[in-house]
Image: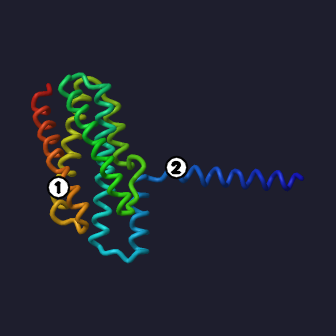
Amino acid sequence: MRFLLTSSFLLLATLLVACGTETNKDPVAEAKFQNEKRIGNEDVTSKQERDAAFVVNVMSYSMLDTEMSQMAQRKATSPDVKYLAQLIASEHAAMQKALQQLASQKSIVLPTGLGAEQAKRLGELGALNGPAFDRKYVELLEISHKTSIDEFDDMSDDAYDGDIRAFAANYLAPLKTHLDAAKDLSDKLPK
């Protein structure tokens, strides 16, 4: 009886540890791994791998922009920052919905949460208040949108899949608008 209880306890402890390590995985890295695994099994071309990586990166950056914008709607002191945050949160939500549909059609695994780097940026932003928060939010928007615009611009011409190429072309202009608005706002915010 004692052996059975000890064995059961060890099995339960092992399962709990195994479950605990599952939740510590970086969602972005896990999505990329799942896509690489599927692509490897299906003998897919390197161009299709690039398409899948683009879709994962887009979702990752869009989730970060959405999370930062939701935070800015609560914490920003500037009405202009709050307005931009509201605009970005709503437009990125629509983009994420379209991206989820596209990923589903193409059997691409998307991240379920922020990656480690994105979570770090969000944490740094959340630690700030007042005008420092406003400036950092706008700075992070500029960084993420510059990166996204470069990728969208490339993929609107070079994506292997026509649907992914169309998605990139469709959302390139709104991203440029967001970047321009962030740059204008950056010039207006007190230093």
Q: How many marks?
A: 2
Q: Is residue 68 left or right of residue 139?
A: right
At 26% from the left edge and 23% from the top edge, which residue is drawn?
Answer: 130
Residue 41 percent coordinates (x, y):
43, 74
Tell me the quarter of the picture where residue 35 sits: bottom left
Q: Residues within 10 Å of mark 1 (few under 14, many from 20)?
A: some
**Image mark for residue 41:** none
Give the side of residue 154 with respect to residue 50, left or right.
Answer: left
- Up the image or down, 113 lies above or below 190; here it is below
Residue occupied by mark 1: 169
> Residue 12: x percent and y percent?
71, 51
At a point 30% along the width and 36% down the height, the residue shown is: 68
Q: Label 2 crowding class (10 Å Cα cut-off): few <14, some 14-19, many 20+? A: few
Residue placed at 39% from the left, 67% from the top? 36
Residue of label 2: 23
Q: Earlier in the sequence, mark 2 or mark 1?
A: 2
Residue 113 image position (x, y, % from top left) = 41, 47
Front position in the image: 191 or 167: 167
x and y percent of residue 96 in the render? 31, 47
Q: Nearer the viewer, residue 174 or 147?
A: 174
Say which amino acid is labelled 1.
Answer: Ala
Quadrant housing residue 66: top left
Residue type, mark 2 in image = Thr
